[in-house]
Every structure is written in structure tokens, then in C-alpha cells.
Amino acid sequence: MKRLRLGLLGCGVVGGGVVEGIHRNADHIAAQTGVEVCITRIAVRDLSRPRTPHVRREWLTDDWRQVCEAPDVDVVVEVMGGLHPALEATRLALVRGKHVVTANKQLMALHGEHLLALAADSGREILYEASVLGGIPAIHNIRTYFRATRVQHLRGILNGTCNYILTRMEEGLEFDEALRQAQAEGYAEADPTLDIDGWDALYKIQILAALAFHERMDVTAIAREGIRSVSGQMVREARARGQRVRLVAEAERTPSGRVTARVGPQWLDPADPLYNVNGVQNALCVSGDLAGSILLAGPGAGRFPTASAVMEDIVKLAGQVRDVRRMDLPLSVSAG
Ligand code: HSE
């Protein structure tokens, strides 16, 4: 059986989920793709930190360059988050002929164009399903489905942490305690201001808009407001009126042909398709000229939902290995 060898950059909430997910489901993936997916290396910041039980000691290094350059790595899985050294690492991996799977929305929103071009030049792929909407296959659907329908409008709840906080505030919790719980559940970014100030949702709507409208907006052109200005009292008063406060991101192509986007709190009525999106759930409403409005909904953050999106991208690469093998063409991955 052919093998697809993974080198992970990071082994925190999502990386640990990928290790566990591969441990549990490698046989399921192999049965469908004919490819054995296995981990050979993991770069971590702190070698002494306790890890999930299925991490083998011999995989670990504190040098990300080693993973990006290793001859026994076919796919670099970037789950470290943040911009640096994630940018340097993904660039190095692509230049060294590795495919890249990343969960990093900041990286893809700010440097996606450059990284996609680099991947094309290197004859490799950079896949980033896990960068938006956790376990919901939003990128997959926008890329593969909306090709006959012209997408006109995207509108969604794209940040699990804010949605969790606002939902818990409806129940009477104060902002700080709700944020602490979101952090304890592993939903928040390492720097939670990225969530609560709307940056995370902004990066995600920029990525989705680029795919839906085939035009990449500069992030500075997207209006942004987070949820700091929303008090517990405002949330509970809205609830008493039958409304819900949610952080909503939107993008559209205007009649003049321009793509615009914005992120900010909205007061939703019960008829709104996003009204029943609670807790860490996310949802994206895609409206098109032929299809009408389609709602994609599911878990927007957390260890296994995000790890599952990372793994679906890995399976796409494993599928290419199988297809290449069937066509009897030279393989870009190792013979096991
Ligand atoms: N911090 C992000 C969120 C993680 O809360 O949605 C998933 O992208």
C-alpha cells in the first residue's frame, strides 16, 4: 500500500485532534483511498509539554525547518496558528516540494494569493478547508458546487468563540466568564482579541469571498466591529424582545460589480436563517442567482471538528495519490 507521510507543525488543540483522528480513522481512510496516511514528524514549541497519548516521542522536534525539509514528509500540516513562523514554514515546505494543509485563516487571508501562486509554481497544493467554519465543508462547497449559479451574497456566523460568548450571555453569564469557558473548550484563538474584535471573522469572510466572487479583497477594505461594545444587558434585552445578537459577516457583489464585505454585531429576528445558530455553531448562507439561498451549518470551532476538516484535505491529497496510481503515472509520494 502507498503511504502519505505527514509532518505536523504544531500539536495543540487542532494538531492533537489530527493525531487522534488519524489514530482512530486511518483504516477508514485507507479503505477508501488505498493509501496509508501516517505521521512521521511533529514540530512543537516546547518538547517537555505533555501530549495526547498517541504522539510518539520519536516524532517530536522543536525545529519546524526539520519538518518542512524532511525527506520522509510528503504533506506538511500547519496547525501552529499565527503568522510567524507559519508563513516562513509553509513557504519552505512548498519550495521543498511538499503539499501543505493549513488551518490558518490569518495566513490565507493575508498571504493566500502568494502561497497559492507558490504552490502552483512548485506543482504542489496548499489546501485550507479548516481555516474557515471548523467542521463545515464551506470551501469545498463553494469551490466545487457554485459554478453554474453565480454567487451574489454570502452572510454568516463565522466565529465560534463570539457565538458561544453571546449565547452564554443570553443565559446570564458575564462576558469575561463566557470567554474563559470558550478558551477552556479550545474554541478561542491563542490571542482571543482576534475573535472578539472581529478579526477572525474578517479573515474568514475575505477567504470565502475570494472563492465565491473570484476576486481577493484587501483586508483593510473590510469594515470590522467586534463584540466588545455588546453588553450582557443588551443581549438580554434583545432576547426579551424575541431577538438575538450575533456577530455576522457579509460579502456581496454590488450591482456596479464591486465586491464589498463587513463584519459586525447584528440584531436578528426569528425569521432570520441565522437566528437559531447557537453556541459554537457556525452557519453560512450562500445566495446565488439560480440556486436561491443555501444554508451550510455545523460546528465552527473545536478540536475534532477542525481536525476533521484538516483530515478531509489530507484525504483529498491521498485521493490524488490513488488516482495517479490508477493512471499509472509517476508518483510524487513514497512507496511504502
Ligand atoms: N477561534 C476560532 C473561532 C476557531 O472561534 O471560530 C475556529 O476558526
Image (tube, rainbow, N blue to C red):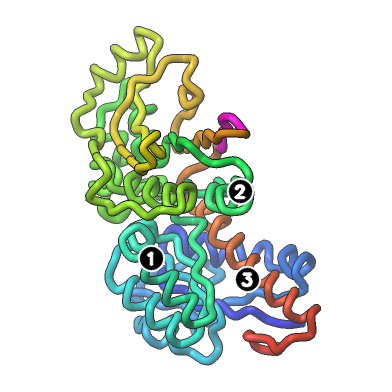
Calculate the distance from the C-alpha at mark 1 to the C-alpha at mark 2.
21 Å
In percent of the image, x 27 and y 52: which residue is there?
219
Task: Identify the amino acid type marked 3.
Answer: Leu
Q: Earlier in the sequence, mark 1 or mark 3?
A: 1
In percent of the image, x 43 and y 34: which residue is there?
155
Say which mark, if any, is on residue 317.
Answer: 3
Position in image of residue 267 (x %, y %):
34, 20
Calculate the distance from the C-alpha at mark 3 to the C-alpha at mark 2.
22 Å
Image height of 107 relative to 132, above or below = below
- The residue that mark 1 highlights is 113
Report the front residue among 332 and 130. Answer: 332
Residue density around tag 3, few if under 14, some if 14–19, many if 20 or more, within 10 Å: many
Work out whether residue 12 can be spotted. Answer: yes
Of circles 3 and 2, the one toward us is 2
281 vs 239, left or right, is right
- The residue that mark 2 highlights is 147
Task: Identify the amino acid type marked 2.
Answer: Arg
In percent of the image, x 35 and y 81: which residue is there?
62
